[in-house]
Image (cartoon, rainbow, N blue to C red):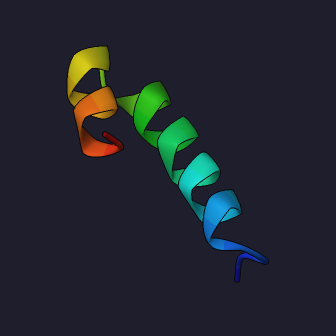
Amino acid sequence: MFDTEIERCVVLGRYIAEHNSTVRDTAAVFG
């Protein structure tokens, strides 16, 4: 579905950022 692993991470990160009010938790997931 995604061309690269980076693209997947970017899309997933954006989704999480839009649906999760806790930014710190989102950052922790991606290190």
Q: Return the x and y of residue 5 as percentages of the image width and height.
A: 61, 71
All told, the count of numbered labels is 0
Q: Return the x and y of residue 4 as percentages of the image width and height.
A: 72, 73
> Which residue is most to the front?
31
> Which residue is most to the right?
3
Q: Quadrant of the C terminus?
A: top left
Residue in the foreground of this view, choosing between 8 and 19:
8
Q: Is residue 5 above or below residue 23?
A: below
Q: Quadrant of the N terminus?
A: bottom right
Q: Return the x and y of residue 25 as percentages of the image width and height.
A: 20, 28
Q: Is residue 14 visible?
A: yes
Q: Is residue 4 above or below residue 31?
A: below
Q: Which residue is at 23% across, 33% downward?
A: 28
Left or right of 9 in this view: 19: left
Q: Which residue is at 79% across, 77% downward?
A: 3
Q: Return the x and y of residue 6 as percentages of the image width and height.
A: 65, 60
User: Residue 9 is drawn in which quadrant?
Assistant: bottom right
Q: Is residue 3 above or below residue 18?
A: below
Left or right of 16 in this view: 15: right
Residue in the foreground of this view, choosing between 22 and 7:
7
Q: Is residue 21 above or below residue 20?
A: above
